[in-house]
Amino acid sequence: MIIRDALEADLPAIVEIYNEAIRGRISTAQLDEVSVEERLPWFRQHSAKSHPLWVAEIDGEIAGWFSFHPFIKRAAYRGTAEISVYVSEEFRHRGVGKAMLDKAAAHSPTVGLNALVGYIFEHNEPSVRLFERMGFERWGFLPRVARVDGVERGVVIMGRHVS
């Protein structure tokens, strides 16, 4: 497995993995599938230094992607980043998510980040367990803040200090 900065040429695979997640209704609050054109501005806003977008590649295929986002755009929060991890259904249970979280924890202090925060649907137990195994703790809970197909969903806030 290779984890590297995403290239614009990777965007179709990134979008397909995200659309899988949208269809699965377990890991994103986005309800409608997205297009490459819609995601292009999002892709271009990532800075390779402080808030990169990575892909995990296995045998030449994009197996998953990972992104850092500014947590809250106020000066005191500069050391915290919100993170997202998505793994293709085809590559799940092969250590892709773990590898990307490992790399994120190692990379974060080098760019001035000291805390990582992830928002995970409460019913997404595999992701909650993965984050817990990777040293994240439950820092908060937002009950019934999302409505997905008429079902209210809570969000677990997972956090980890990395420096």
Image (cartoon, rainbow, N blue to C red):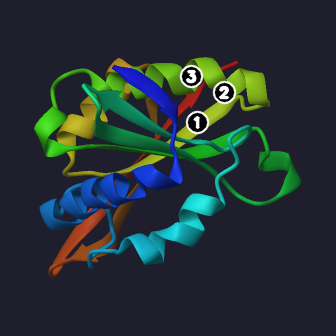
What is the x, y in percent for residue 33? Answer: 27, 75
Residue topped by disc 3:
105
What is the x, y in percent for residue 61? Answer: 26, 36
What is the x, y in percent for residue 22? Answer: 23, 65
Question: In which quadrant is the C terminus drawn?
Answer: top right
Residue 59 marker? none
Q: CA distance from mark 1 to mark 3?
A: 8 Å
In the foreground, 85 or 141: 85
Q: Residue furthest right?
A: 75
Tell me if mark 2 has few (under 14), some (14-19) or many (20+) residues whose alpha carbon lies within 10 angstroms of its own.
Answer: many
* Residue under the point 47% across and 69% down: 39
Question: In which quadrant is the N terminus drawn?
Answer: top left
In the foreground, 97 or 163: 97
Relative to 135, is 122 above or below? below
Residue topped by disc 2:
108
Would residue 74 be found to the left or right of residue 104 on screen? right
The quarter of the picture where residue 3 lies is: top left
What amino acid type is highlighted by mark number 3?
Answer: Ala
Q: Could you tell me how many numbered marks the image carries? A: 3
